[in-house]
Image (cartoon, rainbow, N blue to C red):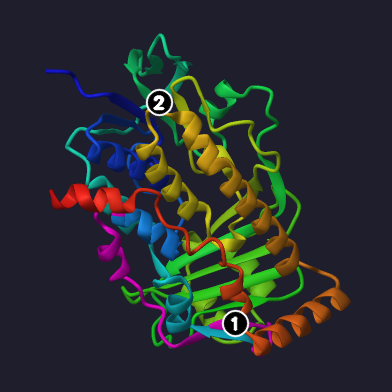
Amino acid sequence: MAQPARAIVIGGGIGGLTAAAALHRRGWEVTVLERARSLEPVGAAISLAPNALRALDVIGIGDEIRDLANWQGDGGLRTPGGRWLSRSSAEAAAARFGGPLVLLPRTTLVARLAALLPPGTVRTAATATLADPGDTARPARVSAGGEELEADLVVGADGINSRVRSALFPAHPGPVYAGFTTWRVLIPVPGAEFASHETWGRGRIWGTHPLKDGRVYAYAAAMTPAGERAPDDEKAELVRRFGDWHDPIPAVIAAARPEDVLRHDVHHIARPLPAYHRGRTVLLGDAAHAMPPTLGQGGNQAIEDAIVLAHSADDLAAYTAARLPRTTAIGRQAVKVARLNMARGRAVVAVRDTAIAALSKAGPALFLRSFDGIADWRPPYASEQAHADRR
């Protein structure tokens, strides 16, 4: 009896675990090597659009994740003083894209993905190095903890500072600073009742969203020099930058402890890679196409990558052909949105806000328009998978 094909996934984040689950579902023997001591993810929450939820349908957990949707009624875009520039609703989003938008803790998604894998698949505290990308005549090789492993496929899902990417494309300049930093909190806020919203100021934005588990996910961003940090703590920095914005922003900041506030500078891959594969080794997620978070598509595109990769694992050129143009276009759109919502000039911001309000009165909210061509994506082999599941 022939041995199953073997894959090694370097990186146990959302993209890596989705790839592992999708490959396992298609009969591959998979090992996930994660350098951290646990699978606890960096970051607070993740927004999943209908495109990613359809991808998760392929591995059988889409409906389970959809059940976590909690965006009800009106939401939209506001000014720091509280005026609504644009309003939308969960119903409008579902009608436009054929499904809901779901916001959930990253830990929930990571745990559910990991549960799809056989015991022993994930090895934590395992720092891995690509020793040889392989080719048609020889397997790829990975070094991890003094051990050398061979595989028919190596998946580089090791994030924005990917060592696999550097090994495959050493001449590529890698990620660059996007010009702004972000803060995130995921906390209970007693008595908080509000509509999901994002608020755009001058060179600053804030978003506040209730989760189904009763907690509140909030994020903020501001134009700052790379590497800058608060002189005291990041909660105090949020008070300085956003403490006089509309409700419920001051209450959310007040409910957070300094240790609840995560801060990270934003980097992205401005120059697309020449390909997402070389030999038997492939890149996905931030390792391949890190993008600003302004469309909320980083994790969504990693999930798409993983599902397409599992289908194209025997033809990595087809994977590159399917994924590189799409993710490059979405990354560029995210950069354009960042320039819009992080604009700082008083006159530019006034024109921006007036235009958003006018456009939203004339048709679908800007929030929904920005997802056209993105959220309506469907897996290339969903019907094939559904047929296989019925057998």
Between residues 2 and 151, which one lies in front from this camera angle?
Answer: 2
Q: Residues within 10 Å of mark 1 (few under 14, many from 20)?
A: some
- Report the residue at 63% width, 85% height from top: 363
- Report the residue at 25% width, 37% height from top: 26
- Report the residue at 65% width, 42% height from top: 269
| Residue 101 drawn above or below residue 262 | below
- Report the residue at 44% width, 60% height from top: 51
Tally of numbered tags: 2
Secondary element under disc 2, as helix, strand or loop, is strand
CA distance for labels 2 and 1: 43 Å
Range shown magenta: 58-83
| Residue 353 position in % (x across, y down) | 75, 81
Residue 260: say if magenta.
no
Secondary element under disc 1, as helix, strand or loop, is loop
Residue 64: say if magenta.
yes
Identify the mark at residue 364; answer none if there is no mark. 1
- Tell me which corner region of the image, top left, top right, bottom left or bottom right, holds residue 121: top left
Amino acid residing under circle 1: Pro
- For disc 2, the marked residue is 154
| Residue 72 position in % (x across, y down) | 40, 84
- Using residue 142 as the reference point, say whether residue 265 is left or right of it: right
| Residue 167 position in % (x across, y down) | 56, 21
Q: Residues within 10 Å of mark 2 (few under 14, many from 20)?
A: many
Quadrant where the N terminus sits is top left
Q: Is residue 59 visible?
A: no
| Residue 36 drawn above or below residue 69 | above
Of mark 2 and mark 1, the one earlier in the sequence is: 2
Between residues 340 and 152, which one lies in front from this camera angle?
Answer: 152
| Residue 282 drawn above or below residue 230 | above
